Amino acid sequence: MTNQTQTTGANMSLAQRAWSIRRHALRMGEVQGQGYIGQALGVADLLAASYFHALRYRPGDPEWEGRDRFYLSIGHYAIALYAALIEAGVLPEDEIGTYGMDDSRMPMSGMASYTPGMEITGGSLGHGLGIAVGAALGLRRKGGDQRVYNLLSDGELGEGSTWEAVMSAVQWKLDNLIALVDFNDQQADGKTTDALARGPEAPKWAAMGWFAQEVDGNDLSAVVAALDAARDHPEPQPRVIICRTKMCKGVPFLEHREITHFVRVEADEWARALAHLDAERPL
C-alpha cells in the first residue's frame, strides 16, 4: 500500500524519506541546542514507513475526514513527528527555525491545538492508546474505513491505563487500530527492561487477543512488511507491531556513546551530526 494522496517527491525512496526526517530533526535540535533527538533518530524509519507507505492523508488538508489518524502518545517525541510532517508537506520546512520558540507551531512537547497534523496532545504517558481505542470505535460506528495508528513507548507498557486500553480494543474487535510500540529500552529512570519484570512482548499482546508482530524498527523492509501484514490480517482483532529501535540511529558517534533517556548533544556536535548524514545520503 502506498500513500494515495502524496504527489510531491513521488520518486523518493523510503530510505531517502527516513534520511530527510533525521535531518529535519537534527536541524530543529540545533535551534534549541536540545531535544529528544535520540528518540527522533531512532523512530525515523518507522515514521517514514508510516507516512510514505501506510497512511492515507492530504498534506494540504490535515483535517480531511477521510484521513487515517496517527496518534503520538509520546508528547516528548514531537520533534520526530514534526520532522515527518515537514517531510510529508503538512508543515513548511521554513518553520524549522521556530522550533520551541514563543508562538511557534512546533512547541517542544506536542500539542494538537498548535500544530496541523498533530492529532492529540501527548505528555502524561499511558493515555494515547486509550484515545486511539475511542477514535477507532467512533470511526467504525460512523461507517468509515479509516485506520487509527498509535505510536507509544515501551515505558508506557508499565502503565495500567495502557493495558485497560489493550483489553478494550479486543472487546470491541477494533481491526482498524494498529499500535506501534517504540521499544528502545529507555525511560526516564533507566532501562525499560530493568523497571518491571519483562519477557517477550509480542506474546503478551497475542495472549490478550491482539494480532502481534515484533520487528527491527530500523529495518525499513521489515517495518513495511509488518504494516502490510497488520493491514491485511483477516481476523477482527486489533493489531500491534513491537518495533525494536536503536537510539540515535544513523549518527554513529551518538549511537556509540553511553545512551540514556535524554541524549545530550554538545553545541559543536549538531553540525558534525548533520555533516555525517549529508555524507551518507541514500541514492
Image: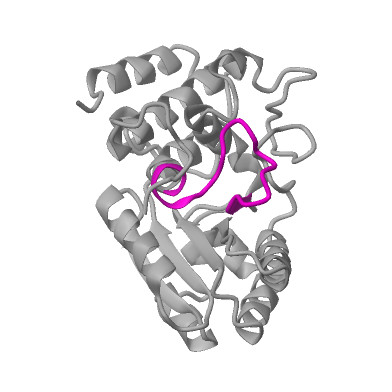
Residue 249 colored in magenta in the image: no
Q: As displayed, is residue 34 above or below residue 222?
A: above
Q: Residue at x 31, y 28 (%)?
A: 253
Residue 69 colored in magenta in the image: yes
Residue 131 screen position, x and y as percent: 72, 62
The quadrant of the rendering that contains the N terminus is bottom left
Q: As displayed, is residue 126 above or below residue 45?
A: below
Q: Quadrant of residue 216?
A: bottom left
Q: As displayed, is residue 135 above or below residue 263?
A: below
Foreground pick, 179 / 124: 179
Spot the residue most to the front. Answer: 143
Spot the residue most to the left. Answer: 283
- Our reading of the magenta stretch's main secondary structure is loop
- Res. 229 visible in picture: yes
Could you tell whether 2 is left or right of 139 in the image? left
Residue 171 screen position, x and y as percent: 65, 86
Which segment did they paint magenta?
50-71
Q: Residue at x 61, y 38 (%)?
A: 78
Residue 37 screen position, x and y as percent: 50, 33
